[in-house]
Image (cartoon, grey):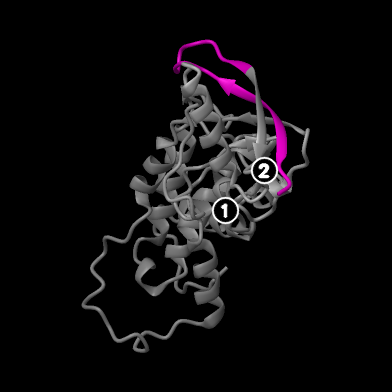
Amino acid sequence: MTTLHLKLLVWRQAGPHAAGRFVRYDAPDLSPDMSFLEMLDVVNERLIAQGEEPIAFDHDCREGICGSCGLVINGVAHGPMRGTATCQLHLRSFRSGQEVVIEPWRAKAFPVVRDLIVDRGALDRIIAAGGYISARTGGVPDANAVLVPKDDADAAMDAAACIGCGACVAACPNASASLFAAAKIAHLGLMPQGQPERPERVLRMVTQMDMEGFGNCTNIGECQEACPKLISIDVIARMNRDFLRASMFGGEGRVTGGGEA
């Protein structure tokens, strides 16, 4: 069986206030069928056996769903495969002998906790600011009782695919969280149940995003390229329209339908 030999350059940082540095590790005898995180597991097992500190990295489901596995690999958020989270990236995407640089997300709003782990609590606070429906919308209707245009339903489902990994922030030169916030705002705002709170939702979530220290969106588009769920920057345009409308009308917004631009 063909094996790979990778040369890793990994960011090591003992804590939020410690100085960080890149450390070289040799990673021989790797299966090309391993996922990237499985490779880090193997490296850590070898480090532990040698009495060294393992590399700290975030992970949970390892199925491309939870969004916790984000790493910058050779300068690209989540690595070289488009539409793929780090945990779903396999070593067959690399060549034997290649140097692989592994870093945490780089953003003021994502302080390093340790090594490759960052605190992404800022994204949770954006959700807490308004990413939910609290208005009374009555009992649960039959599935076909509330008519939703197919285009709106499809767009809402596309936006709801966001897993909150933060790759958009890591990829953006401005460290903007606009794609994340816009996706959360869009998937609620496109549905009938989300209409009552649509104006105040966008005002509160955008305000919280600014308070967290994320940069402004300048439509570079790196966010949608790095997004493992391929969410389009079209949602940012929708968020901007909703924000301007809500700002002009004092939070009333005068929005009527989910599909209204």
Choose between 212 and 170: the one closer to the eye.
Answer: 170
Q: Are marks 2 and 1 in contact (CB under 8 Å)?
A: no
Q: Nearer the viewer, residue 56 or 251?
A: 56
**Residue 132 percent coordinates (x, y):** 34, 57
For label 1, the crowd category at 10 Å Cα-Cα, with few meaning under 14, some 14 to 19 and many 20 or more, is some
Q: Is residue 109 visible?
A: no
**Horizontal and vertical percent for residue 248?**
49, 53
Image height of 247 relative to 76, above or below: below
In this rendering, does residue 215 appear at all? yes
- Element under label 2? loop
Residue 192 in the magenta stretch? The answer is no
Residue beneath disc 2 = 79
Residue 86's x, y, as percent?
58, 45
Occupied quadrant, residue 232: bottom right
Image quarter for residue 106? top right
Residue at point 52%, 49% (across, down): 180
- For the image shown, how many numbered marks are present on the structure? 2
Q: Amino acid at mark 2?
A: Gly
Q: Amino acid at mark 1?
A: Asn
Of all residues, the one furthest to the front in this rendering is: 1
Q: Secondary structure at mark 1?
A: helix
The residue identified by callout 1 is 240
Bounds of the magenta span?
A: 1-22
